Image (spheres, rainbow, N blue to C red):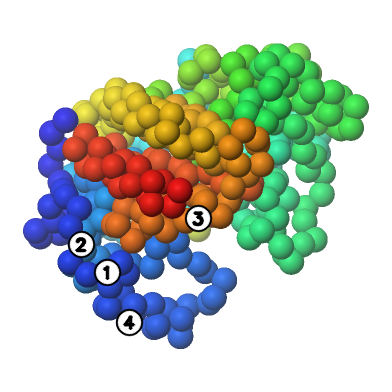
Amino acid sequence: MTQTLTGGPGLTQERNLVTEVPGPRSRERLARKKAHVADGVGTALPVFVEAAGGGVLRDVDGNTLIDLGSGIAVTTVGNSAEAVVRRVREQLDSFTHTCFMVTPYDAYVDVCEALAEVTPGDHAKKSALFNSGSEAVENAVKIARVATGRDAVVVFDHAYHGRTNLTMAMTAKVMPYKHGFGPFAGEVYRAPMSYPLRDGLSGEQAAARAVEVMEKQVGADNLACVVIEPVQGEGGFVVPAPGFLPALARWCREHGVVLVADEVQSGFCRTGDWFACDHEGVVPDLVTTAKGIAGGLPLAAVTGRAELMDAVHTGGLGGTYGGNPLACAAALGALEEMRTHDLVGRAREVGAILHERLGALAAVHPVVAEVRGRGAMVAVELCVPGTTEPDAARTAAVAAACHAAGVVVLTCGTYGNVIRVLPPLSTTDALLHEGLDVLAEAFAATA
Ligand code: PLZ
């Protein structure tokens, strides 16, 4: 794949370490961060970045690192994709803000039109734009409640939906996301997720288990929506067993429950389809998107059945910055990149490499209990060999070794024992292989 890369003068697509990581300049800045930034805001790898693009980040010490994390699933098209940069620059020359709720502009409508095209299903769709994934999820719940006249929300074990009050209630993991931050919003119920490594159930069996909770502990007549990540992100890149999502979708349809697919992390080519739901042909009623939608600028959306989206009274949805013109221009640029460079196809190629290389790793390191994921969203779960007892310490050690060697990997999972690989799709095969070589060395060095 050829792609024009920006990201600053002299940025080369290779790993190059000239100091230890983090180097002295990053450490200096870390001391400034400590003085001025609240301690509650953590950093996975404290190198301060001065240029980024393609599949690399260059830090202030002159080290160039391989990025296997995409800023948590955001820079699918790269950190400085040509079409994103070009369209944002053009928009900057015109205006930065008017507020769509005061005086509208084309880019917002263009993004909504594009979302109707790319999201699952060919029914009539409409969208509303927001700033963050959390905000999109909150608004999906608001829409589902108004449309159904019901209150309850069902979410799943290991789910991550955000850090606002309602979405904290929807997120499963207490530390660091919820600890001390309650009380949380009510009418949120948790059902068991399909997690094949840990439950050994088929998709149908796992769906029946979840449906029992919905019927016996919530009641379909009280249930506004079921919110699910079709491939879980922060929860550990958990891929439900085949048939789980279609069975849930069927049950929702039969009971007038709105099915919300939270595709904030899995959407926009990441899984080798436009959306993770596409893999099993599941058509959700509402889809929440963010992250990869706009190549790094803050934008999020709720897209769904026109009659549901239109159930809300005029003025009931919005926000000062939702669908900001720069973010919309960036989204149109990101979509242009995805289409021009067939990033759905590229995600599948990346996925084939990841499965081959991580599978080889699993074959020699029994600590790898499972390799799972789709497209360019693949992870390894680390357990005490022969068991499903999580090995978070080894996971942290492997990640630290990668970081020291100039490869950005992220961990995830309820038990902190999953290493996820989700590179920008603008990365080259050579960089990807080098990043995976470093990961393999990190497994060997921590054995
Ligand atoms: N839904 C599925 O993955 C964000 C969170 C990182 P915001 N995931 C990364 C962190 O530690 O805060 C996410 C997600 C899914 C919703 C969200 C929330 O998106 O844009 O972070 O609000």
The residue that label 4 is drawn on is 28
- For label 1, the crowd category at 10 Å Cα-Cα, with few meaning under 14, some 14 to 19 and many 20 or more, is few
Compare marks 1 and 4 and give the one earlier in the sequence.
1
User: Which amino acid lies under the numbered mark 2 shown in the image of this protein?
Assistant: Leu
Q: Are marks 3 and 1 in contact (CB under 8 Å)?
A: no
Mark 2 or mark 4: which is in front?
Answer: 2
- Between the C-alphas of marks 1 and 4, the distance is 14 Å
Residue 311 shows in the view: no
Q: Which of the pair 141/8 is nearer the observer?
A: 8
Compare marks 3 and 1 and give the one earlier in the sequence.
1
User: Which amino acid lies under the numbered mark 4 shown in the image of this protein?
Assistant: Glu
* Horizontal and vertical percent position of residue 327: 36, 50
- Between the C-alphas of marks 3 and 1, the distance is 19 Å
* Horizontal and vertical percent position of residue 31: 40, 83
The residue that label 2 is drawn on is 17
Q: Which mark is residue 89?
A: none
Residue 156 shows in the view: yes
* Horizontal and vertical percent position of residue 114: 38, 30
| Image height of 193 relative to 420, above or below | above
Please give the name of the residue rendered at 53% of the width and 15% of the height, measured from the top-left corner: 280
Q: Quadrant of the N terminus?
A: top left
The residue that label 1 is drawn on is 20
Q: Are marks 2 and 3 in contact (CB under 8 Å)?
A: no
- Between the C-alphas of marks 2 and 4, the distance is 18 Å
- For label 3, the crowd category at 10 Å Cα-Cα, with few meaning under 14, some 14 to 19 and many 20 or more, is some
Please give the name of the residue rendered at 53% of the width and 39% of the height, measured from the top-left corner: 367
Q: Are marks 2 and 1 in contact (CB under 8 Å)?
A: yes
Compare marks 4 and 3 and give the one earlier in the sequence.
4
| Image height of 290 relative to 376, above or below | below
The residue that label 3 is drawn on is 396
- Residue with the most extreme right position: 216
- Between the C-alphas of marks 4 and 3, the distance is 24 Å
